Image: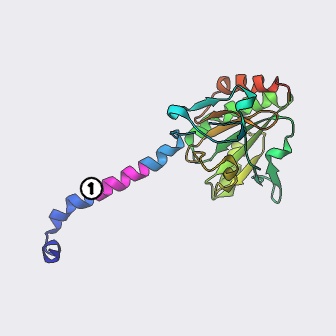
Amino acid sequence: MSRAIASRPSSARRPLRRVAALLAGLSVVAVLAGCSTAGKDAVAQGGTFDFVSPGGKTEIFYDSPSARGTIGKLSGPDLVHDGKTTSVDDFPGKVVVINIWGQWCGPCRAEAPALEQVYEAGKDKGVAFLGINVRDNQKDKAQDFVTDNKVGYPSIYDPSMRSLLALGGKFPTSVIPTTIVLDKQHRVAAVFLRALLAEDLQPVVDKLAQEQA
């Protein structure tokens, strides 16, 4: 058998090479699709946040405070200020919008103006924003993204995505961008597994800002 394979003409081996190349290409496509594809399972339950997305939904809302779960300590090195640690705990008593992004992600670039619009509208009303920059091994490119898009809120620099462990092991970290909205007690009130428009996010933020702490 080994002699037969070895003596096979090169022209006969070409189809096999084409199949291998095609499979490799499909694998790349599958990885890139993670930029906008939601996971199948993700629910916040009272107590610790346990992510579940029934039917692969890209929007999950926890309107009842009793149904909202808490996340772990979410913190990490600040993207812009060397030596500084940025954390959700920096915003006590505030609604916090967490946006997971990468400068390499097209949908992240598309939604940046909308996020900044909602941030500007809410920063004096008890609403804070915190970005988490992931999979960007070149920090300067991530910093350029912040400058070019005039992003006014801080971001954690987390190329290895370690800070996301605070969101629980079941969280679909392959879905970029993702936006998580915390209420004033920093419980998960809404999750968006897609790029957002201002009109998607603004009503959610406004409602939570009006809740009693």
Splitting the image into 4 quarters, where does residue 204 fall? top right
- The answer to which of 27 and 116 lies nearer the viewer is 27
> Which residue is tagged 1?
19
Judging depth in this view, the residue of 180 and 187 nearest the camera is 187
Residue bounds of the magenta highlight? 20-29
| Residue 97 screen position, x and y as percent | 74, 36
For image coordinates 56% across by 43% down, the residue present is: 175
Image quarter where the N terminus lies is: bottom left
Number of numbered discs visible in the structure rendering? 1
Residue 100 location in percent, x, y?
65, 44
The residue lying at 85 percent from left, 25 percent from top is 212
Q: Is residue 169 left or right of residue 90?
A: left
Q: Position of residue 140 (x, y in %)?
A: 69, 55
From this view, report whether residue 209 is shown above or below residue 45.
above
Residue 28 is one of the magenta-drawn residues: yes
Give the quarter of the figure containing the C terminus: top right
- Most common secondary structure along the magenta stretch: helix
